[in-house]
């Protein structure tokens, strides 16, 4: 097997915590370089920007963009123009329409553009999808609450326009929702709580449905302390399905049905290696569309300022 030589662009918390180990564990993938203004890795070539990487760096086949979403479109375009495959951390961008030109570039260049949704690769997500196929779904509720100071310490970009605020984790729940439900859903109403000093929401309540009127609700909050909540509850005609731990555990009426260790990012890189072998792209924008519609429809309230 030919090794896929990958450069990580943006070497912050998510790259260190998840991408490094995943690349090392996946056959056919090898980390070749780092591009980051603020961090490097001993023993690997380091460059300040993607432009410097592409101009002066070692031979690479692909880039994995772990930078804030506000800058990913330009970086992806530069990499595709240089003939590289591109993996995009979630969310794939700051808007929906900006992805269309990148998809067209990837097709023309016969290169892979992979918009990743790591939570879809949590071990209980596929068992949940299969279980729901044979049942009538009556309602869905999402409870996705975490402490921003724990998961995004000092990351001011998340509060800027395009940073998504609480939708940065909330979109993980929406990526699972759009995978496990048999029919597409859409937003009908939303309430967004903006700190007085921020340009992105710290909490959100969503109401969604599908073409048949399925009631779906979601509660997102970045102010959770103590135990963190990443749960999806699905009431059906033959029991309640509970996905907890961000999709790592599945229970039916309280009895564990599926549970496994977290290998979400390993699965992403396995998929990336497969896609690049044929130059095929994988860009599903359904979760991002739901977030965009929440911003369009959302009633906005101002809450106390956020201080990190």
Image: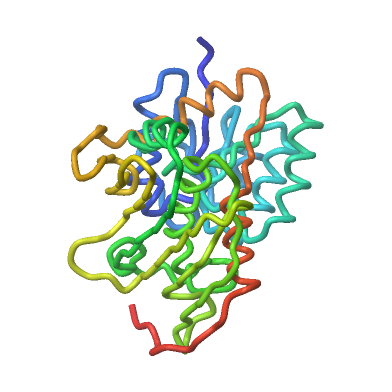
Residue 169 x/y as whole percent = 42, 58
Q: Nearer the viewer, residue 292 or 118?
A: 292
The quarter of the displayed image where residue 282 is located: top right
Residue 247, can we see it? yes
Q: Nearer the viewer, residue 280 or 303?
A: 303
Taking the spot 18% from the left edge, 39% from the top edge, the residue there is 255
Is the residue 46 above or below the residue 188 in the image? above
Residue 239 x/y as whole percent = 31, 43
Residue 213 x/y as whole percent = 57, 57
Is the residue 198 above or below the residue 280 in the image? below
Residue 71, can we see it? no
Q: Is residue 87 left or right of residue 38?
A: right
Residue 78 x/y as whole percent = 71, 45
Q: Is residue 114 left or right of residue 152?
A: right
Taking the spot 58% from the left edge, 68% from the top edge, the residue there is 294
Give the quadrant of the C terminus.
bottom left
Q: Nearer the viewer, residue 54 or 195?
A: 195
Total numbered labels placed on residues in the image? 0
Taking the spot 58% from the left edge, 43% from the top edge, the residue there is 183
The quarter of the displayed image where residue 189 is located: bottom right
Q: Residue furthest top?
A: 1
Is the residue 86 above or below the residue 156 in the image? above
Taking the spot 54% from the left edge, 79% from the top edge, the residue there is 199
Q: Is residue 268 left or right of residue 111?
A: left
Q: Nearer the viewer, residue 142 or 53?
A: 142
Specify how the rendered protein is coloured. Answer: rainbow
């Amino acid at each position: 097997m030919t090794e896929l030589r990958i450069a990580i662009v943006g070497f912050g918390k998510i790259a260190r915590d998840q991408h490094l180990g995943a690349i090392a564990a996946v056959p056919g993938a090898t980390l070749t370089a780092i591009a980051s203004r603020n961090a490097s890795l001993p023993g690997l070539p380091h460059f300040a920007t993607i432009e410097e990487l592409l101009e002066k760096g070692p031979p690479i086949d692909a880039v994995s963009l772990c930078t804030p979403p506000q800058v990913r479109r330009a970086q992806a375009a530069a990499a595709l123009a240089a003939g590289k495959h591109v993996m995009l951390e979630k969310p794939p961008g700051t808007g929906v329409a900006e992805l269309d030109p990148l998809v067209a570039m990837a097709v023309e260049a016969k290169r892979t553009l992979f918009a990743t949704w790591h939570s879809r690769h949590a071990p209980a997500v596929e068992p949940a999808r299969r279980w729901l196929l044979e049942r009538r779904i009556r309602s869905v509720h999402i409870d996705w609450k975490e402490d921003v100071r724990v998961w995004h310490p000092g990351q001011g970009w998340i509060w800027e326009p395009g940073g998504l605020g609480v939708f940065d984790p909330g979109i993980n729940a929406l990526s699972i929702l759009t995978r496990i439900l048999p029919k597409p859903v859409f937003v009908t109403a939303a309430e967004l709580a903006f700190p007085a000093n921020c340009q992105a929401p710290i909490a959100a309540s969503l109401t969604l449905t599908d073409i048949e009127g399925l009631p779906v609700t979601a509660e997102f909050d970045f102010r959770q302390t103590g135990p963190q909540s990443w749960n999806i509850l699905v009431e059906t005609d033959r029991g309640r399905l509970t996905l907890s731990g961000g999709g790592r555990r599945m229970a039916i009426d309280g009895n564990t049905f599926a549970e496994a260790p977290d290998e979400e990012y390993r699965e992403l890189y396995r998929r990336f290696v497969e896609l690049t072998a044929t130059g095929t792209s994988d860009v599903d924008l359904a979760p991002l569309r739901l977030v965009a519609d929440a911003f369009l429809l959302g009633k906005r309230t101002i809450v106390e300022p956020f201080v990190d």
